[in-house]
Image (tube, helix red, strand yellow):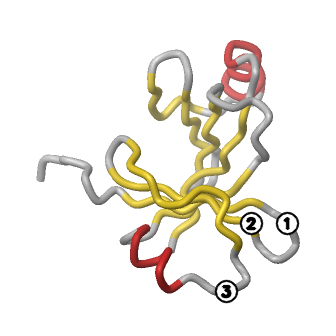
């Protein structure tokens, strides 16, 4: 399990990019259209993922794992399912709440067709 992203919902991607990229100097890593942009944080491998799909969603850590389905079946009992495993571009994702109410997201890249 690796912390890959800090998911940061936004209702204004342009304003968020102005802050994080232009104001704080984070480097744009990749984007999916005008809805999602990942930014590299200096000094770490973790990225901020700005996303406009659900601006009211909680800020959440996103962990990359080998298999979302395997994790879902063997997850600790204390994790409450918010969104069951579902396919996303390149793999699968699921969302949970921990015992304290914080949201965590797990994803895999099992269907990503990277060239060697």
Query: Around disc 1, counting alpha carbons within 10 Å, would you say few (fewer than 14), some (14 to 19), or many (20 or more)?
Result: few
Residue 20: x and y in percent read 72, 29
Q: Is residue 64 left or right of residue 49?
A: left
Residue 105: x and y in percent read 61, 59
Q: Residue furthest left?
A: 116
The alpha-carbon separation of the residues under discs 3 and 1 comes to 14 Å
Up/down of 98 relative to 107, above or below? below
Q: Residue furthest right?
A: 100
Name the residue rendered at 36%, 41% in the picture.
Answer: 89
Q: Are marks 2 and 3 in contact (CB under 8 Å)?
A: no
The residue indicated by pointer 3 is 77
Q: Are marks 2 and 1 in contact (CB under 8 Å)?
A: yes
Up/down of 68 relative to 110, above or below? below
Up/down of 114 relative to 66, above or below? above
Up/down of 112 relative to 106, above or below? above
Residue 23 marker: none
Q: Secondary structure at mark 1?
A: loop
Residue 101 marker: 1
Name the residue rendered at 37%, 71% in the picture.
Answer: 66
Name the residue rendered at 56%, 82% in the picture.
Answer: 75
Query: Around disc 3, counting alpha carbons within 10 Å, would you say few (fewer than 14), some (14 to 19), or many (20 or more)?
Result: few
Among the two numbered marks 3 and 1 on one chain, the one whose residue lies closer to the N terminus: 3
Q: Is residue 116 left or right of residue 94?
A: left
Nearest-to-viewer mark from 3 and 1: 3
Residue 40: x and y in percent read 57, 41
The residue indicated by pointer 2 is 97
């Amino acid at each position: 399990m690796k912390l890959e992203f800090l998911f940061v919902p936004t209702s204004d991607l342009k304003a968020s990019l102005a802050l994080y990229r232009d104001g704080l100097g984070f480097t744009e890593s990749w984007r999916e259209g005008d809805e999602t942009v990942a930014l590299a944080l200096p000094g770490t491998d973790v990225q901020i993922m700005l996303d406009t799909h659900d601006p009211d969603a909680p800020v959440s850590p996103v962990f990359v794992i080998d298999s979302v389905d395997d994790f879902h079946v063997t997850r600790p009992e204390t994790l409450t399912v918010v969104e069951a495993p579902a396919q996303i571009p390149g793999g699968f994702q699921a969302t949970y709440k921990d015992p304290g109410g914080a949201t965590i997201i797990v994803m895999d890249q099992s269907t990503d067709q990277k060239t060697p």
